Amino acid sequence: MIFGKKRKYPLPKFPPDVKKNFLKLTELLSDEDARSLIPQVDQCLAEFEQESTTNQLLNIELARKLARCSKELLDTYHAHTDAEKPLILGAVRYFAVHEDSMSEHAFATGFDDDVRVMNHVLEEIGREDLVIPLR
């Protein structure tokens, strides 16, 4: 983690349980086990795609960007350090596997916490080239 440096992409303070939920999802997995999450990312995006046909609040473009970023991180997981790998898994799971702090289904800003978590991790692991703009 970056200490003594002001972050461009800190973890969000609202909702207050974002950090706690994110940290619960971090763990070190083998490269093969991490790559096994790719179908879950695809399934999650497919479900959001389907729901977006009837839910105008769902920001499907942000979901697509989060899915692309998640898959890129899982594809390159093997190249990261053992300290970075749990952060990657936490961000991917926060988006694709976990019911997180803000409902994507109920709010137009529902993916904002997912994007902020992802961007925080991207800064931590030196992949700011993948940062997802919120607006």
Image: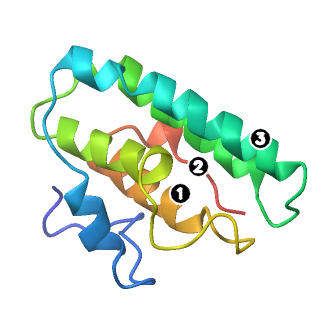
- Which is closer to the viewer, label 1 or label 3? 3
Q: Is residue 134 left or right of residue 77?
A: right
| Residue located 68% across and 41% down the image | 47
Q: What residue would you read off at disc 1?
A: 115
Callout 1 amino acid: Val
Choose mark 1 or mark 2, whichever is in front.
1
Mark drawn on residue 49: 3
Give the answer, above or below, for where 92 lies relative to 6: above
Q: Is residue 14 above or below residue 107?
A: below
Assign a secondary structure to mark 2.
loop
Assess whether mark 2 and mark 1 are in contact (beta carbons under 8 angstroms).
yes
Q: Residues within 10 Å of mark 1 (few under 14, many from 20)?
A: many
Pointer 2: what residue?
Answer: 132
Q: Are the two marked residues, 3 and 2, in contact with CB atoms closer than 8 angstroms?
A: no
Q: Vertical placement of 125 versus 133: above or below?
A: above
- The reply, left or right, for residue 27 in relation to residue 130 is left
Image x and y of residue 56, in percent: 88, 63
Residue type marked 2: Ile
